[in-house]
Structures are given as structure tokens and as C-alpha cells.
Amino acid sequence: MEVKGVLGNISFDGEWITISKTPAGVKPAPVRIRAADITGTRFKPATRLMHGYVQFLPPGSLAAGEKGGVLHAGRPPYADPHSLSIPRKANDGAEKLVAAVEQARS
């Protein structure tokens, strides 16, 4: 299962979540998190005017807060390795991915 986000994608194979970001410049290594280790998930659907996001909370970490401002308002900063912004057309896929991760957690 894979969701294409803004500047990256999230894939889930039933056990591992992989977040790959595609910035300009040096490409960072993908972040892999085991679904059973996740302590929580956050999903904010995108609207016509604003991107949404998917965020996973690994053990011992706090959720990155939402940024303010005009262009990046309402979503975690790009530097947060455990989240990815999503466009409106990815809402359904992201919702299914989050549900699959929640089911794998339990």
C-alpha cells in the first residue's frame, strides 16, 4: 500500500512503514518504522485550499506541532521525519493506510 504525498511518499507492507521524502538537493535516507512500535497516528485530510498530513508517533517522541504562516500552515514542518504532507487527491489512500497501520498496531 502506497500513498503519494507532497515531496515524497509513504508505503506500508503490513509490518513496516517507510517514509521517503524527495527534496531538492541531497536525498535523505527513507525512514522505516515498525507498525507495532507506533504509539499513535495523526491524520488531517487535505482540503481544496490546504494540504493535509499523515504523522506517525514512534515511542518516546512527541508529535511535531503544526506550523503557522501562509504556505505551510496547518501541517508539521518538512524536517519532521515521521510525517508527510498530502494533497487532496491522496485523502482516500491516506485514510486507508492509517487504518491499516492502526489495525497492525493492535
Image (tube, grey):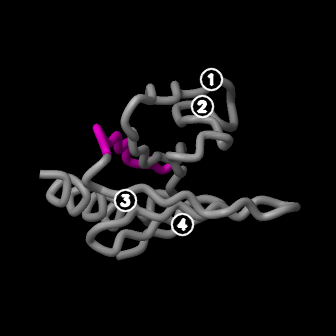
Distance Cα–Cα, label 4 vs label 2? 20 Å
| Residue that badge 3 annotates | 91
Residue in the foreground of this view, choosing between 56 and 66:
56
Number of the label disc, if any, that sits on residue 9: 4
* Circle 2 SS class: loop
Look at 35% across and 44% down and name the residue there. Answer: 43
Tell me which label, 4 or 3, sits earlier in the chain. 4
Chain part drawn in magenta: 38-48
How would you rate the neighbour count of disc 2 (Cα within 10 Å): few for under 14, some for 14-19, many for 20 or more? some
Distance Cα–Cα, label 1 vs label 4? 23 Å
Distance Cα–Cα, label 2 vs label 3? 18 Å
Which amino acid type is marked by label 2? Ala
Number of the label disc, if any, that sits on residue 68: 1
| Residue that badge 2 annotates | 73
Tell me which label, 4 or 2, sits earlier in the chain. 4
* Circle 1 SS class: loop
Please give left or right for residue 102 compared with residue 23 in the image: left
Distance Cα–Cα, label 1 vs label 3? 22 Å
How would you rate the neighbour count of disc 4 (Cα within 10 Å): few for under 14, some for 14-19, many for 20 or more? some
Residue 55 within the magenta-colored segment of the rendering: no
Indicate whether 82 appears above or below 31.
above
**Residue 34 percent location from the top left of the image:** 35, 57
Asked whether the residues under the numbered discs 2 and 1 touch, taking CB atoms below 8 Å apart as contact, a structural biologist would say yes
Distance Cα–Cα, label 4 vs label 3? 13 Å
